Image (cartoon, rainbow, N blue to C red):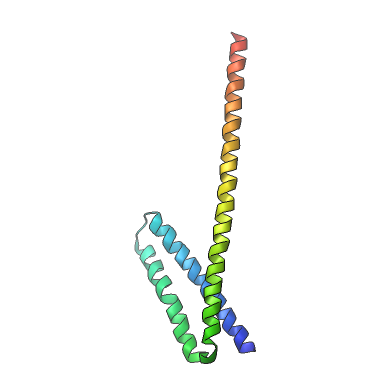
Amino acid sequence: MAIIILSIFIGLITGVVQFFLLYKFVTSVTGGQMGKKTVIFGLTQFLFPFAVLVICAFLLTDNLMWIGIAAAASLIISAVIRFVFASRFDELKKSNELKKSKELKSSKENSKEQKKKKV
């Protein structure tokens, strides 16, 4: 039982690390930064799960399935969490920008009215 829990833990860590590497790679590529660092992230993201699974295939042969399931699950869950947070922050950012633009309009209108009163 303890080996199964260890296998699941290894899979969870593998999935989270793979998501981090994939996120860094994708943001660098979509940002137009194709440098050495981006290429290293891409190669590491591609080779990392294979390396973990090969090492675990020799050490934890009977529990390789649990490692793969946990890695895939944590990768999917990390992506969903990132999406939810990104969409929430985008909504908050848009609402704050809308509030600021409304405040700016009202302050401009107030200053125009005050100038008209002075004249």
Q: Quadrant of the C terminus?
A: top right
Query: Residue at coordinates 60% horizontally, 25% vertically from top-left?
Result: 107
x 61%, y 10%: residue? 118
User: How many discs appear?
Assistant: 0
Q: Residue furthest right?
A: 1
For the residue pair 65 and 29, the one nearer the viewer reads as: 65
- Name the side, left or right, on which 114 lies relative to 72: right
- 104 up-or-down from 45: above or below: above
- Residue 51, position as x, y percentages in the image: 43, 81
Query: In percent of the image, x 47 and y 91: which residue is there?
Result: 58
> Residue 111: percent from the left, percent from the top?
59, 20
Quick one: quadrant of the N terminus?
Answer: bottom right
Horizontal side of residue 55 vs 34, given as left or right: right
Question: Residue 100 location in percent, x, y?
Answer: 59, 35
Answer above or below: position of 119 versus 21.
Answer: above
Nearer the observer, 89 or 76: 76
Residue at left offset 55%, top offset 54%: 86
Residue 101 appears in which quarter of the rendering? top right
